[in-house]
Amino acid sequence: MEPMQFNFCRHLVAAVLATGFVGLELNTMPAQAQISPYCQQTPEAIAQKERLRQATLKGDRNAQKNYMTMLRKHAEGLRKCRQNTWTQDQAIWIRLYPCDARPGMLDAVLDQIVNRGYNQIYVETFYNGRVLLPATDNPTPWPPVMAGSGKGKVDLLAQAIQKGRQRGLKVYAWLFSLNFGANYVRRPDRQQTIARNGLGQTSLNANTIAGLSVDLGLGNPDEAFIDPYSPQARQDYGQMVRAVARRKPDGILFDYIRYPRSFGAASVASKVQDLWIYGDSSWKTLLQRALNYKGMDLINRYLSKGYISGDDLRQVNALYPKEKDPSWQGLNGDRVKSNLPLTKRLSALQSELWNLAVAHAYQGVIDFLLAAAAVAQDERIPVGAVFFPEGNATVGKTGFDSRMQPWDRFPDSLEWHPMVYATCGDTSCIVSQVQRVLSWATPRTLVKPVLAGIWQEPVSNRPPLEIQMQAIRRVAPNLKSISHFAYSWQEPASDRERKFCRP
């Protein structure tokens, strides 16, 4: 590791861390009435646009012309409204299905998103071990979402980008990251890429919690986390990001930039066996952080047993008599000098080894993100990282959140998308999460909070979206962007129809 990276690791370990809807009428309302809190369309405009869309599907050329004119007017009206509204960018997260390849279906979905006042969409492009690329142009090891639908040639991501921009929407590709999916790690030629902890577990058999996108945190059989140090995994992921970048989305968001989250007491990593650093590549890389053979031997013993003993020190000294003290990157040599009493020296060595292991786990997450982001940035595509505000938390004196998500060390050149999903019956815990992220952000950082919920109704112990937004605005009036999880929550009937229809 370069000296700059070493310092980075050291610091990383040290850091602890009611209103109703007002529509937008484009043709008859006075200019000042076009500005609403949420830039939503009136029921009359929505109905008119839908009639034109349906007539267009039946081949009515005049309706098609009027439909396209209305799309342009709504796009321009949305642009003007958003310029004068908090927030200027309002996004929604959405999963597309093979049924969206049916004539007019994607148009209907995107129209509804514009009707609700959104000017950005985050399209789920890589998730559960599948990728939203056409079967005829998929250079990745993951099967395409469109597989088996009879629509293998359809490039649904490219269509969403094109049709979204037609409506004034910016379209981001949303990608799972360290969660590669079970079908990937079960391949005979990819099994060495899976992440492991010191108990011999992987995310396939450990007691872990899935993300919010899966039934509010219930298990996800498709979830499987990889070793971020795996060269094979990084190569495969980079290839996929390049394929997505060729579609020229307006941005790429990296989600699951973390390790699995465990239940109960296991949700805190307090010993080295709790860390997901026992994959082949991670273990090898950690040994390479040693600066001499004594250091490498002690690191290996620590990983293998979870501790080192006085016998370990004596054996290492006998094996490498020409080396004075064990050494590795980040070691505070003053704490472990050989002239110290054995008990004190042993305690200090174990503390330093724990710091090294934690820094190594964090560094894997960061390095993976930076490598993936570089692929998109080479194509001049903006990049964002999605994270939990508590994912970088310390617990007690030596414990860490088991997700080991060091978002406070993510570059401020990336967009920050904190998932402020806290539930406490009101907005106080949600606001607290936003404030926590803002306290770490630099003035340059674009912070774009992600809210979970629906309009005008509480859900899952969360207030309605408009109530959440009003509360956040009071404490963070300078935020320029916010997003809502998810389209499927707001339009459950549409989501079911599109998910289970016959393509």
Image (cartoon, grey):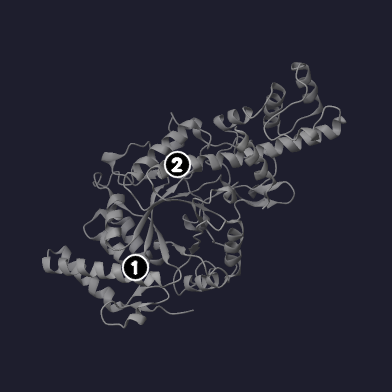
- When the figure is inspected, residue 4 is found, relative to residue 85, above or below; the finding is above
Counting from the top left corner in percent of width and height, residue 300 is at 67, 27
Q: What residue would you read off at disc 1?
A: 79
Residue 339 falls left or right of residue 207: right
Please report the residue visible at 58 percent of the width from the left and 58 percent of the height from the top: 437
Give the quarter of the image for residue 119.
Answer: bottom left
Give the quarter of the image for residue 138.
Answer: top left
Counting from the top left corner in percent of width and height, residue 214 is at 47, 54
Q: What residue would you read off at disc 2?
A: 374
Give the quarter of the image for residue 108.
Answer: bottom left
**Please, what is the three-letter code of the amino acid marked with disc 2?**
Ala
Is residue 205 visible in the rendered image? The answer is no
Instruction: Categorize mark 1 by other alpha carbons within 10 Å: few (<14), some (14-19), many (20+).
Output: some
- When the figure is inspected, residue 396 is found, relative to residue 288, above or below; the finding is below
What secondary structure is found at the residue carrying circle 1? helix
Is residue 372 visible in the rendered image? The answer is yes
Please report the residue visible at 29 percent of the width from the left and 66 percent of the height from the top: 111
Q: Quick one: which residue is furthest to the right in this view?
A: 341
| Cα–Cα span, label 1 and label 2 | 30 Å
Counting from the top left corner in percent of width and height, residue 425 is at 58, 70
What secondary structure is found at the residue carrying circle 2? helix
> In the rendered view of the protein, which quadrant contains the N terminus?
top right
**Please, what is the three-letter code of the amino acid marked with disc 1?**
Arg
Please report the residue visible at 25 percent of the width from the left and 67 percent of the height from the top: 71
Residue 368 falls left or right of residue 435: left
